[in-house]
Image (tube, grey):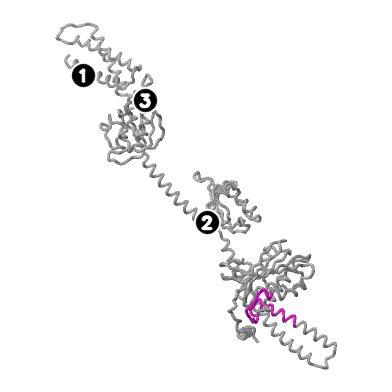
Amino acid sequence: MVPFLIFLVGLLGVSLLELRTAYRRDTMDSKRRRRLRSFALLLAVASVALVDYLPTFGVHLYPFGYLGVLAFLLGATRTVQRYSLVDLTPAFAAEEILDTMADPLLVCDVEGRIQVNNAATSSTLGFTEQELRGRRLVSLAADREQEGRIQELLGGKTLRGREARLQHRDGDPIEVSLSGSPLVDGHGRLAGAVVLARDIRQRKRIEAALRESERHFRALIENGTDVITVMAPDGTILYESPSIERVLGFSPEERVGRSVLDRVHPEDRDGVAFLLENMVAEPDATITEEIRLIARDGSPRVLEVRARNLLHEPAVGAIVANSRDVTQSRRLENELRQRHRLEAVGRLAGGVAHDFNNLLTAVQGHVFMLEEHDDLPADARAEVEAIRQGTDRAAELTEQLLAFTRQQVRRPAVVDLNEVVHSLRPLLHRLLGAGIELELALHPDRVLVRADASQLDQIIMNIVLNAQDAMPDGGRVRVATGLETLADAELDPADGEPAPPGTYAVLRVADTGRGMDEATRARIFEPFFTTKRPGEGPGLGLSTVYGIVKQSGGAVRVDTAPERGATVHVFLPRATDGDGADDAGEALADGISRDGP
């Protein structure tokens, strides 16, 4: 009997402890609490039943004592199963959630004192739960500004993601994101506040690293020489780096929202549209092409474009193109090819001119001896005269070839370009005829150059005659002189070698004729190249000009377009009054040594 009583009393004590724990965890006035009160009454009945087993009284309350013990055992077993083995009350769940939360959570009363805090609060702020319990929340603020934000919470305001700084136990500020809402009692009165303080120090470090990385790459893009373009599948520009202003003259703001095809050269536009369409259809496709674009000033620019389809990349979702301005590189390449071509033609023409000149000298010598015969019949003399005229024309042709190859004998002297042009005015009027107006625009000051005066006459005559051929229906020719300073490589490669930088005397001859397309302009200095019909000219006019100018240390530029006329710019090294003429004897000897016997 005694062991049974000990077991029964022990079971009763354990049940009372479980009942107390469950009762405290449950919410006020809930159905579960009412059941717990009923169970407490049952335990009271069981306690009374124990009296039946107390030998002190010697009173046995049969059969009620056994019924009470049986009810107690059933109820105790149910309580242990419900509240101890599977304890899922809301209060217990809330306590477990608090302990498993990664973010600090604090519950304050109406005075702002901390009543509940979780383990994350201690690990983040460095205080133990006992140190935080009862402490005022505002005491955790890092400064007065943060105190004001905490007071907003305690005053009944709801906050969501407000950044603040709390103070760690060691005194260091901790950046957190505060979220909170007020607590009200059953009567609607403010009872406190629940505060969630998410530690955002790691997020801040990541954001700072991202900003630094973005600043770094933005500096690379915005200060790079290449143009970075981000475009939509239809070619609409979404972003363009500032270097586009240096290349095309348009600011990025002017380009964004417009089609990438807007400034593409008309001849390349269909091809670029086709490439864009094919690229959109193939994810991760890459193309590399040279594309011509039209700058703001109307000049063509050549860009080497490397584009990649990144529409499938969520972080990009666009087509990204890297464009490099290769206009100058292509210009230099064209210049080099043109120079090699002219040099090859010049060597061929020079060799032919030398051999032909030797043969011509012999013919001219025999003609001279025939003309010395007094008994030469009249009809034969006429034929000899025709031969002489032919040899004279052939000699002129040889001189032009030698001028192109820079092997013509020069007799340089300091001359005024204004005087040369003015002295040719009557002859130019006769050459142009009544249908073409001649206009002279001479520089007010002397324009001195060191050159062969006869070669200057030849330059002007050839250019003016070329202009006359371009105006069969009449027009106007304007001959001007002046001074101009050239920078490095300012001349177009189609016009041959660029002149070195410096100040030059300039001769300009402009006409209102038919003009030329780019393909024609690229060949105008080639010997024997002509747009005239067969028999109308050998095609040596501008090639002779080119040879003389280059031999004089100058350069030539031609500006033209179809139906817009042409302007020939001749740049000659400027001379001064103190410059004397070159030694004519040395020049003559040097020229004879190049001409050969």
How far across and down, in percent of the image, does residue 195 sit? 36, 31
Graded by Cα atoms within 10 Å as few (under 14), some (14 to 19) or many (20 or more), the crowding at tag 3 reads some
Bounds of the magenta span?
Answer: 392-420
Nearer to me, 94 or 199: 199
| Residue kind at label 1, given as amino acid type | Gly
Q: Residue placed at 18% from the left, 10% from the top?
A: 53
| Residue kind at label 3, given as amino acid type | Leu
Q: Name the residue under label 1.
A: 10
Q: Which of marks 3 and 2 is nearer the N terminus?
A: 3
Relative horizontal placement of residue 525, taking residue 69 as reference (left or right): right
Relative horizontal placement of residue 11, taking residue 487 as reference (left or right): left
Q: Marks 1 and 3, Cα distance to the nearest angstrom? A: 41 Å
**Which mark is in front, 2 or 1?**
2
The answer to whether residue 354 is above or below residue 53 is below
Q: Earlier in the sequence, mark 2 or mark 1?
A: 1
Nearer to me, 335 or 242: 242
Q: Quadrant of the C terminus?
A: bottom right
Q: Name the residue under label 2.
A: 226
Q: Which residue lies furthest to the front in this view?
A: 444
Mark 2 and mark 3 in contact (Cβ < 8 Å)? Answer: no
The answer to whether residue 396 is above or below residue 317 is below
Does the magenta-highlighted stretch encompass residue 407?
Answer: yes
The quadrant holding residue 508 is bottom right
User: Of helix, strand and loop, which one carries label 1?
Assistant: helix
Q: Marks 2 and 1, Cα distance to the nearest angstrom? A: 87 Å
The quadrant holding residue 302 is bottom right
Q: Which residue lies furthest to the left in this view?
A: 56
Q: Mark 3 points at which residue?
A: 183
Q: Quadrant of the N terminus?
A: top left
The quadrant holding residue 336 is bottom right
Q: Residue 85 carries which label?
A: none
| Residue kind at label 2, given as amino acid type | Asp
